[in-house]
Amino acid sequence: MKINKKRICIVLVGLLLILVGSRFLIFNVTPSLPRGMYLLLPAKDIQKGDLVIFDIPEHLKECQYIPKFTDILLKEVGAIENDKVEIREESLYINEKKYGNIYKQDNLGEKLPQLSQKQLQPLKGDFLPLAPALNSYDGRYYGTVKITKIKNKAKLIIKI
């Protein structure tokens, strides 16, 4: 009988989460950021590039791209106040550096929200949540989020 190390690891991680509780750890199962276990840290001194856990904005709670089993999202702080956010040729640029594409439709041909550059530009107290994965549903499609919605910083400790 062949042992599937990945399945065993997932089961062990699940058991660890049950034993320790989700106050200190979360398990990311979506492909937008590396799958695995993340250690939750205090939400202090938020900087561009930090991985953060934040409450799902109210208008996204019924979105088909947001998993129904959660009320939080894990994303990178892609831009903050004073970063220059631009849309050029269906791509997102932050401070003149291309971050990634902005698609008009998903893999099934469904229309994705198309926001203006103004809707993507963080104002004071906002951040633009992003994820480097090619097909991530992130701030490119729902805009900025208040920094006060951030619950924790997150650090990947076990990649699966």
Image (cartoon, grey):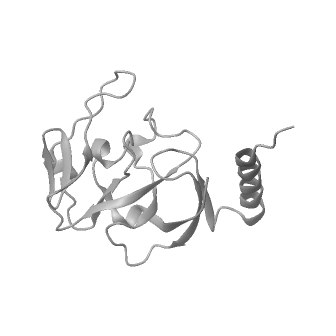
In the picture as drawn, the residue positioned furthest to the top comes out as 109
Q: Is residue 128 left or right of residue 39?
A: left
Decide: is 142 above or below 25.
above
Residue 141 image position (x, y, % from top left): 30, 41
> 124 or 90: which is nearer to us?
90
Q: Quadrant of the N terminus?
A: top right
- At 45% from the left edge and 32% from the top edge, which residue is drawn? 64
> 18 or 6: which is nearer to us?
6
- At 39% from the left edge and 22% from the top edge, which residue is drawn? 108
Decide: is 136 above or below 94.
above
> 5 or 94: which is nearer to us?
5
Residue 134 image position (x, y, % from top left): 36, 42
Rendering quarter of residue 84? bottom left
Q: Is residue 110 left or right of residue 83?
A: right
Q: Is residue 127 left or right of residue 50?
A: left
- At 15% from the left edge and 46% from the top edge, which residue is drawn? 87
> 54 or 30: which is nearer to us?
30
Residue 50 image position (x, y, % from top left): 39, 67
Residue 121 image position (x, y, % from top left): 19, 56
